[in-house]
Amino acid sequence: MAHHQLWKNLYGNNSRYLISLFFAGVPVCMQRSFPLFSQQPSLEKRVQVSPPLTRGPSAFIPENEVMQANGLDERTNLLVEEYSTSGRLDNITQVMSIHTQYLESFLRSQFYMLRMDGPLPLPYRHYIAIMAAARHQCSYLINMHVDEFLKTGGIAEWLNGLEYIPQRLKNLNEINKLLAHRPWLITKEHIQKLVKTGENNWSLPELVHAVVLLAHYHALASFVFGSGINPERDPDTSNGVRLIAVNNFCVCDLANDNNIENASLTSSNFGIADSLSELEALMERMKRLQEDKEDEEASQEEMDTRFEKEKKESLLVISGAFDDEIVSTDVSRYVEDPGFGYKDFARRGEDHLPTFRAQDYTWENHGFSLVNRLYSDIGHLLDEKFRMVYNLTYNTMATHEDVDTTTLRRALFNYVHCMYGIRYDDYDYGEVNQLLERSLKVYIKTVTCYPERTTKRMYDSYWRQFKHSEKVHVNLLLMEARMQAELLYALRAITRHLT
């Protein structure tokens, strides 16, 4: 159903008036039961961010390349008008608009979960987004939703920290941290605890809405850090950058790569010839894999061995020693158990966790129908977004045209799932090792598992001959693969609770 039609169904002849108010910046509540309320957030409620060292929407991508790549065409502007919750072109949207087809799917699904009729009241949705973003110290997203939380009638006191929020919201802390860092630990007992009878219980539709929001914002934090998204510029401040909370790993000096200019100089020391030979070697490996597949298929036993090997090798992919991470006070007010983080699924010497066999619980056959039944229509929107990013191709690689990149896209997606313990029986994990070089694996693991550590040096170190638009596509694939992995674990637990 078209977006305007949904408004019309909700508000009848007043829909156009309300739309015009909404995009003019007037807070319009789409849930008739919730009062309209607007409040300007005070600076102490925001998370302060240092001014970016580079101009434009991204610290990693030159501003002119973002502008040239998307041209900020009429279609992008229409999408922003139609589906942006802030009603303006923010930095995430500018970088994503390099891939306009995907941007439409992304904005439609995000708009639906934040603005359209659903089980949760509007302020809850934005507070859940804040809780999710805080797991990765993502001040960019926290600040965005602090503003939105207040605009939709949220109680300002809640922004003082988790001890000020209702108990039922506090009860989401456990599933929030597990989803963000170790989703394979989620069991039906976690679900039962949340939906048990009592004044603070969650209905299943409310819980599914909350889980979708948590997974969405964990994954979006990966995109923000992976793409080096800069803080928003605010015309109301003297230096053009909104003061909103210093985070130990703030966007501008991403994960202690303190001097972005120096980092880019370091990365440029790679020779052009090296980059070109790297590209040619990757294309040759893709071609050889395709030919080998046509000649003979590996046995199931060999496929099992290759998955186990890749899972164990992911242990060796380390993005640096960060044992003494400190979460800033501004962010920590929204975080319970800040020391809890990602731990390798395949870590040796611990209880063996059973691999999640994708064939036993797939998004297509199980997750999609469950989420759609409990939270109407979100399944269709998410499915479209997953398919869009997985199938998106321009049949190019760097300077080469007419290239089938299917094997490369599949390797990226499946490697993320492999790190989360999800295995596809029909996929040969030997392809991952052949197609993803070490610097790319370090980047993928960092962006997916602890995005707040991502640096420009990591971004620059892989695929040095590729376009920035291709690296943005990588980040979109990582984001969606991560979101789908989190949802699979959560929805499987809900299914087990129901049976």
Image (tube, grey):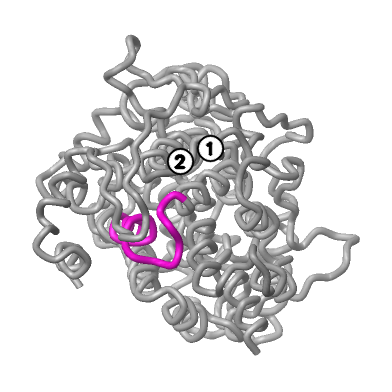
- Quarter of the image for the C terminus: give it: bottom right
- The secondary structure that dominates the magenta segment is helix
Start and end of the magenta stretch? 106-123
Say above or below: 28 vs 49. below
Q: Position of residue 293 (x, y in %)?
A: 49, 79
Q: Is residue 244 magenta?
A: no
Which secondary structure, mark 2?
Answer: helix
The part of the image, by quadrant, that contains residue 89 is: top left
Marks 2 and 1 in Cβ contact (< 8 Å) = yes
The part of the image, by quadrant, that contains residue 247 is: top right
- Residue extending farthest to the top is 238
User: Which residue is found at the position 55% from the left and 85% from the top?
Assistant: 297
Q: Amino acid at mark 2?
A: Val
Q: Is residue 283 left or right of residue 36?
A: right
Q: Which residue is mark 2?
A: 224
| Disc ID at residue 273 | none
Q: Is residue 320 left or right of residue 62?
A: right
User: Which residue is found at the position 49% from the left and 23% from the top?
Assistant: 49
Compare residues 66 and 294 and report the one nearer the observer: 66
Q: Position of residue 95 (x, y in %)?
A: 32, 41
Compare residues 45 and 229 and report the one nearer the observer: 45
Q: Which residue is mark 1?
A: 138
Q: From where the camera sits, is residue 487 visible?
A: yes
The part of the image, by quadrant, that contains residue 88 is: top left
User: Which residue is found at the position 58% from the left and 41% from the top?
Assistant: 134
